[in-house]
Image: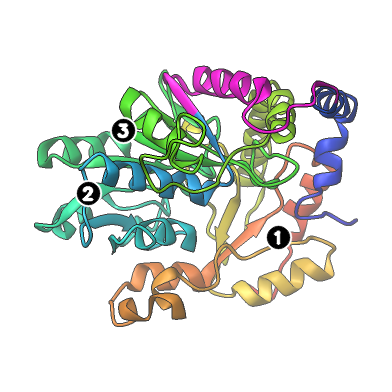
Amino acid sequence: MDVPFLSLRDVNARHADELKAAVARVIDAGWYILGDELAAFEDEFAAYCGVRHAVGTGNGLDALSLVLRAWREMGELVDGDEVIVPANTFIASFLAISENGLRPVPVEPDPVTFNIDPARIESAIGPRTRVIMPVHLYGQLADMGAIAEIAGRRGLLILEDAAQAHGARLGGTRAGAFGHAAGFSFFPAKNLGALGDGGAVVTDDDQLATYVAALRNYGSEVKYDHPMRGINSRLDEIQAAMLRVKLRYLDADTARRRAIASAYREGIRHPGIVLPSAANESAHAWHLFVVRSRWRDALQQHLGTMGVQTQVHYPVPPHRQHAYAELAGMALPVTEQLHEEVLSLPISPVLTDAQVAHVIAACSACAEAA
C-alpha cells in the first residue's frame, strides 16, 4: 500500500466545486486586489482566532516581518534590538528578524515538546531584548502561560509564529491570540492552506493593524500618499475567496488530524521510535506528526520500501545555515540532536483508516531501527 506524505490534490478535491465557485465569483466581480473577498476573509479569520484584526499578506514570512517592521515604525524597535527565537525552527522565523535590522537570539527547545523552553528564556534576555517570538512548532502551542509571565514581568513584546498552528487552542484561546500579534502562513501544505502563497497578521492592537495594513501596500493608506516605506505583500482576492471556503472545514480537519495522531500514538510500538508528546490535545493542531529515532535514516529507508512517504522537518537548524554563519559557534546541542533524529510521518485529513493502519504496522515492524 502506498501512503503519500501529503496529497494536496486529494485535500482540495473534497471542496472542488466550492473552490471553483469562489474563483468564478472573483473573476466575475472584476476586482482582484484588496477587495471584498479579502475584507470578508480578514473579518472571518479574525473572528476565528478571537482577535479584533486580521491583515492578509503575501505569505507567512511577510506576516512576521511586517509586524516587526510596524513596531519599528511605531518606535518600539530600533536597529540592533534582540528577538528571542527558538533555535529549533524553520529559517523563516530567523529571516523575519534579521531583515528588519534586528538580532535573533536562539534559545534551545524542550526536547519533549520541541518548542522553546521557557526555563531557558530568562537567561537569554539581555539589555537589548525587546521581543519574544515563540513558534508553535508542528502545530503544538508553546508554553504561552510561562512565556507571557516572563514577557509581562520584563516588559517584552510577544510575536507568535503561528504558521503551523491554525486551530490549536488552550481553553477558549486559539493560536494567534496569546501575544501582542501573530503571523500565520497559508502555504498550500498548511492546515489552512491556500492554492498559492498567502499569510496574515492577527492582533488586538488597533494601531499595529493600521500600520501593517499600510506597510503591506507600499506604505500607503491613501492612494499615492506614502508616509512610510512599505512593500507589496497583499493576499489576493482569489486566495482570500478560497481560504473562506476552507476555513469552514478547518475544525473538522483538525479533529481528523487529532484522531490520526491518537491512533499513531496508541498503535506504534517500537523501542527505537520516540513518539511525540501532547500535554493537551486541543493545544495541538498536528500540522506534522514528528517522531524521533537514533536510526532516523534507516527508519526512513525502511518506511520508503513499505510505500510510506516521510519527510525531515528540518535537516539543518538555522544556526548551522550559511546564511547565519555568525551563529555557527553557538552551542545548541538539544537542537542539533533533534535535527539529526526527527522524522515526519504522513498526517492529513484525507488519510484513510487503512493507510493509517499501514503506517503503524510499517513503523512497528522496522528491524533497522531496533
Amino acid type assigned to the residue bearing label 1 in the image: Cys
- Judge from the rendering whether residue 120 lies leftward or rightward of residue 35; answer left or right: left
Residue mark closest to the camera, 2 vs 1 = 2
Mark 3 lies on residue: 180
Mark 1 lies on residue: 363
Q: Magenta residues?
A: 28-54
Front position in the image: 1 or 272 = 1
Asked whether residue 68 appears in the rendered view, the answer is yes
Instruction: Check disc 2 and report its element: helix, strand or loop.
Output: loop
Above or below for 141 versus 370: above
Amino acid type assigned to the residue bearing label 3 in the image: His
Front position in the image: 178 or 257 = 178
Above or below for 22 versus 161: above
Asked whether residue 370 appears in the rendered view, the answer is no
Q: Residues within 10 Å of mark 1 (few under 14, many from 20)?
A: many
Instruction: Tell me the quadrant of the picture where the N terminus can be found.
Output: bottom right
